[in-house]
Image (tube, helix red, strand yellow):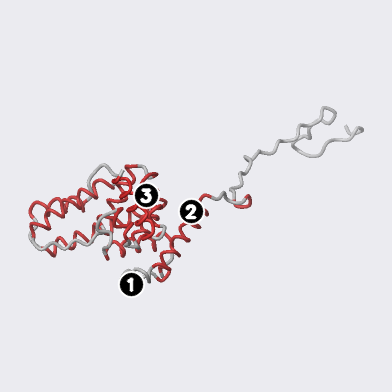
Amino acid sequence: MKDRIITGIFLCYVAILAGGAVDQVFLDSMFFPPALDRQLLGMVDVLRDRRPATVAEARTQAEGIRQRLADIRLEREASKLEQDLAGYATVGETLEAFAALQEQARQAAIVNLVDNDEFSLGICIRALDPDLAMRLWVSGSDDLKVRQGCLEALKKISAHPEGFGYDPNGDPMARREAIRAWRNWRREFMEERRRPAPAGQLPQVQPPAVPPIAPVPSAAEPPAPKGGAIPGPGAP
């Protein structure tokens, strides 16, 4: 009984602290298909800022990123980037080389987030706000690289290059208004996508062309001879 009371108090505290964001987070985790949920979280994880101190640590991280990319790709064959990451995980020698591969992986994750728009839009928008609810949902979400990467994905799919004034380096409270604008945009964007096209915009189906039918000569009027006009009744 005591454990239930403590759990209830904790949940109420989280709900108040998160300002209404917790319900969205946990509802999404309930309704997302598990495979898609893991895929999208993997993309966000690739965006995280990893700064290894040693080459050995960088090799371990390269293998982890390679596995993430392998999990989210749709193609059967491994990409060149995955092969390069696998090679670095085996014989990598410099931190600069890992940083270059990490940036390529980050761009690949952004592309995948754009391709999975309906679900990833919600993930990206919440990743812009590193509050307690987001930290409960995915560890390490309060990363500048995550905020920057998700903002880039949102800009690409929304055609809003100004990002509603969102500043990844700004104070969390200062970002609230921009995040609210992103949420409103997402709702309108998805409603517009689900709305059927007006009748005037529907494609017009043209009937197949019918070749003209040649007139059939009447029995009372014999066809004209090829050399001239039809002779009159008294003509020889």
Pair 1/2: label in front:
1
Pair 2/3: label in front:
3
Residue 226's disc number: none
- Residue 130 location, x and y as percent? 32, 62
Residue type at mark 1 is: Gly
- Seen in the picture, residue 235 relative to 41 is either above or below; the reply is above
Residue at image mark 1: 170
Q: Residue at x 35, y 71 (%)?
A: 167
Q: In the picture, which quadrant includes the C terminus?
A: top right
Residue type at mark 2 is: Met
Label 3: how many Cα within 10 Å (few below 14, some 14–19, many 20+): some
Residue at image mark 2: 190
- Residue 215 location, x and y as percent? 75, 35
- Seen in the picture, residue 207 relative to 115 is either above or below; the reply is above
Q: CA distance from mark 1 to mark 2?
A: 28 Å
Residue at image mark 3: 26
Q: CA distance from mark 3 to mark 1?
A: 26 Å
Q: Residue at x 61, y 44 (%)?
A: 205
Q: Indicate the quadrant where residue 21 lies.
A: bottom left
In this view, the residue in front, 19 or 117, is: 19
Label 3 secondary element: helix
